[in-house]
Image: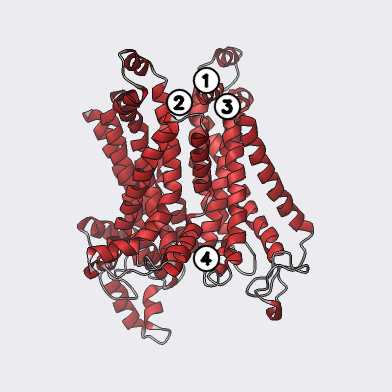
Amino acid sequence: MIRYLASRLLSLALSLLVASAVIFLMLEVLPGDPARFMLGINAQPDTVAALRTELGLDGTTIERYLRWITGLLRGEMGISYTYRVPVQELVSARIAVSAPLAGYALLLSTLIAIPVGLLAAALRGTVADYGIMGLTQLGIAIPNFWFGMLLVLGFAITWKLFPSGGFPGWDAGFWAGLRALTLPAIALALPQASILARVMRSAVIEVLSQDFIRTARAKGLSRTQALTRHALRNALVPVLTILGLQFSFLLAGAIIIENVFYLPGLGRLIFQAINQRDLIVVESAVMLLVFAVITVTFLTDIAYGLADPRLRRRK
Amino acid sequence: MRLPAQMWIGAALTLAFSALVLLSLVWTPHSVLELSISTKLQGPSPAHWLGTDHLGRDMLSMLMAGGRTSVAVALVAVGIGLGIGVPLGLIAAAWRGSLLDEVLMRGNDLIFAFPSLVIAILITATFGPSAVNAILAIGIFNIPVFARVSRGAALGIWQREFILAARVAGKTRLRISAEHILPNIANLLVVQATIQFSLGILAEAGLSYVGLGAQPPTPSWGRMLAEAQTLYYGYPRLAMLPAGCIIAMVLGLNLMGDGLRDMLDPRLRRVARQ
């Protein structure tokens, strides 16, 4: 297990390093000098030079990369070119929206998908199973941002149960925040729940065909008992792996959903920053997203290794 | 057996929409560049079967031409994934366990860690938004998918005896990969391509919706949805029609892909029948 852990850790560190280099280099080739952009075309050369030093834009590419990376490790992301405030303050305010949104959607998706998948597996071959599977196909095919628009039309405009967009901030109270995130989370969860329900169904069907279930039935357990006591636990292993993947899809998918609901999340920050050429914000926010995705994948790998000892020796 | 029905529905949906998109190459009822503010936001009529949008453009023509963008982007992106991903996967499988294999697969994991949307944002930030850059973003994301699928499938084929025979006959690993492995995993690649195609349509819609894909005046289903966002409370048709096209196309491709997979994989068919 220790060797497995060490090799995964090494791979994690390497991935993060390469990812940071890729992000840095991609934005590095962008034309335009942020300092000149901020000061306008009539600025004195020495003013520009002073600002460049202040923003950490002087030095070679490698020096700047190292400065950015060491800053990130200390939790310092530099100063935003447009807002003139530390980037970590901007980013952390946005994470307070994006992370709960992704978590909320993941929770909804799991709470819906696992019972639905189990039900479809238990009723396999019946009209109900076909109905559920048809609905999940539809759920995968529906663009979630459009589903978000429909939700706004129904639950915000017609029935006025939820706000149509925007975010009051957590200061306005936990429930107000949760209410604002409910429709976006539902929209975000729809395709993921559909995929998860399908995975759950086939995992349960796979487990049900195995010998130990027959043994359990032979011992006198009813179908339902065998399903809940034995099949469920074993079927959850593949589902857990998918959950890890889903979290990264949710984080990324949130970028689009935030636009539907005008939520001040990480995605909208990245869009604004691109438009304002606020590259240091783009760099750090994108790196943070990628960091989250890579780390979640890593944790899923570890969890999987813990759950299934055979996998540790795979590589 | 539900297989044939599912495949038929999928294939019919896909073919119907592909035909409409192909037809738009030579004919649309009206020009999609033709603005007519005086006839904007009209309901369906003999002149405009599906009505007009907020700039008076014919909705049916917009849907047909918009599908062209969506399908072209998704199709080329699948091509990129196939063209680069499959050779990489085959090479990795042919030299299994080598440093090359390790490097290729780690590189794949790395691309995988960038959600396609983030790749798209980075590309857009650097080169500006356009349909071509949307293709690149989606295509790059397809590479690791195809590399993984083809490597995994190829590893299984490499264990077979006819491969051993080919090696004894003196064929190089590259030649074996091209002549024996590739034909044997082609089925699987077709299925994966169908799935990636449908994902590509959804991704293009998402990117165009946030303004990172096709640019005006090029119509696309995603852009039509974005333009409808402020108007669909009063004119739901504007948002329902493009969404209906996306859903039908994606649903058709997915049903077809699932049907094909079940058909090609007897093990799955057995499970499905039980």
The disc labelled 3 sits on which kind of residue?
Leu
Where is residue A11 drawn, in percent x and y?
A: 32, 39
Q: Give the foreground label among 4 and 2.
A: 4
For label 3, the residue is B174
Cα–Cα span, label 3 and label 1: 12 Å
- Label 4 sits on a secondary structure element that is loop
Subunit of label 2: B
Name the one closer to the observer, A120 or A222: A222
- Label 1 sits on a secondary structure element that is helix
Residue displayed at 79% across by 60% down: B27
Subunit of label 1: B
**Residues tagged 2 and 1 counted as in contact (Cβ below 8 A):** yes
The disc labelled 2 sits on which kind of residue?
Arg
Cα–Cα span, label 2 and label 1: 10 Å
The label number, if any, that marks residue B211 in the structure image: 4
Subunit of label 3: B
